Image (tube, helix red, strand yellow):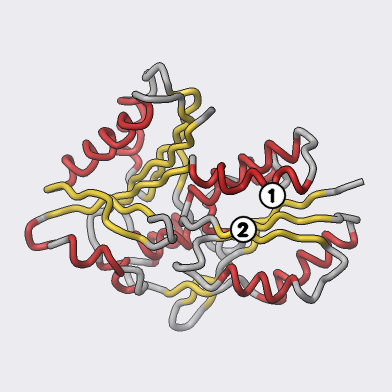
Amino acid sequence: MQKIALITDSSCDLSESTLDKYNIKMLPFRVIFNNREYLDRINITSNELFSALENEIPTTSLPDIEYSSKLIENLIYENYTHAIILTVSSNSSGCFNSIRLLCEHYPELQYHIFDTKTIGYPVGEITTQVGNLIRNNNNFEYIVNKLEDIRLRTHGFVTFPSLKYLKAGGRIGRVAGAIAETLNLKPIISSDEDGFLYSYAKARGRKQSILKLKQILFSYVDKSKCKVTVLNGAANQEAEALLNDVKDHPNITEISLETIGACTAVHTGPGTIGLCIFEER
C-alpha cells in the first residue's frame, strides 16, 4: 500500500494551518544577514523580515542539508513509501537540483521531484492541489501524471513599489529592460513557461498597478471559474481593499488573503501585493 508524503520548500508561502491541513512537509530556505542566519518560517517571520529590511537586505540560500536529510529520514521511519516534492522554479533557485541530489541517498523512498517553474504562493497553490489528490486516495502514478496540468492552470502576478530588492537579490533578469523607475513605472511580475521572472505588464504609479492586477484577474474569471488568493507583503489595507473589490465576482469559487513569506519578501520588499489564480475545470 502506498503512503505518499508531500514536500515543498518555504517559498510556497502557505500558512501553518494549510501545511497542517494537507500534512505538507516544508524545507526552509535560509535567510542570511551579515552577522546572523535564520531558517525561513522556523525562526524568522515575514513581519520580522520586513522590520529588518530597514537596516539591511539579506540574501537567501538553499534549504539546510542537515534539516532536509532529517526530514526525509523521518518520513522513511514513519513508513512513507513515496514522496512528491514540489520546488520553486529551477531557473530562480538551485533548490530543485539540491533536493534531487539529496534524494539519491535514499533509494528506499520512491520520489518524484517537480519543477513548478514559478515562485512564491503559486508554488503553494500547486502543492495544495496535490494535497487534495493525496487526501482523495489517488495513487502516486496518477498524481505525478496530473502535475503538469495543475501547473499550467496556476498563475501568479505581483507588483511592488521598488525594484531595489529584486536587484539586490540578483533576480532582476528580464524585468530590468522593461521598467524605468524614473518614470514611476511599476512592474507586474510573473513567471514565464521556463520559470524565469519577467515583466508581464507595467503601469504608471501605484494605483494603476493595482488596477492592472484587477484587470488581469478579470481576464481569467470572466472566462472560467477560478480559485483566487490575494497576496499581502506589508500592504495590508491595499490587499484587503483588492480582495473586497473582487470577491463577489460570480466565477470566483474561493478567495483568501495570504501573507508573503520572509524568503519571498527578501526579493520583493515591503508594499508587495499580488494574486494567485487557479483555473478550475
Quarter that holds the C terminus:
top right
Give residue 233's position: percent from left, percent from top: 38, 50
155 relative to 62 in the view: left or right: left
At x 54% / y 53%, what residue is drawn? 12
Asked where in the image residue 108 lies, by quadrant, the reply is bottom right
Give residue 201's position: percent from left, percent from top: 23, 49
- Amino acid identity at mark 2: Phe
Give residue 97's position: percent from left, percent from top: 60, 73
254 relative to 267 in the view: left or right: right
Q: Are marks 1 and 2 in contact (CB under 8 Å)?
A: yes
Name the one closer to the observer, 81 or 53.
81
Is residue 157 something one can see in this rendering?
yes
Q: Which mark is residue 114?
A: 2
Q: Identify the residue under disc 1.
A: 144
At label 2, counting other C-alpha atoms closer than 10 Å, the crowd grade (few under 14, some 14-19, many 20 or more) is many
Residue at far bottom of view:
35
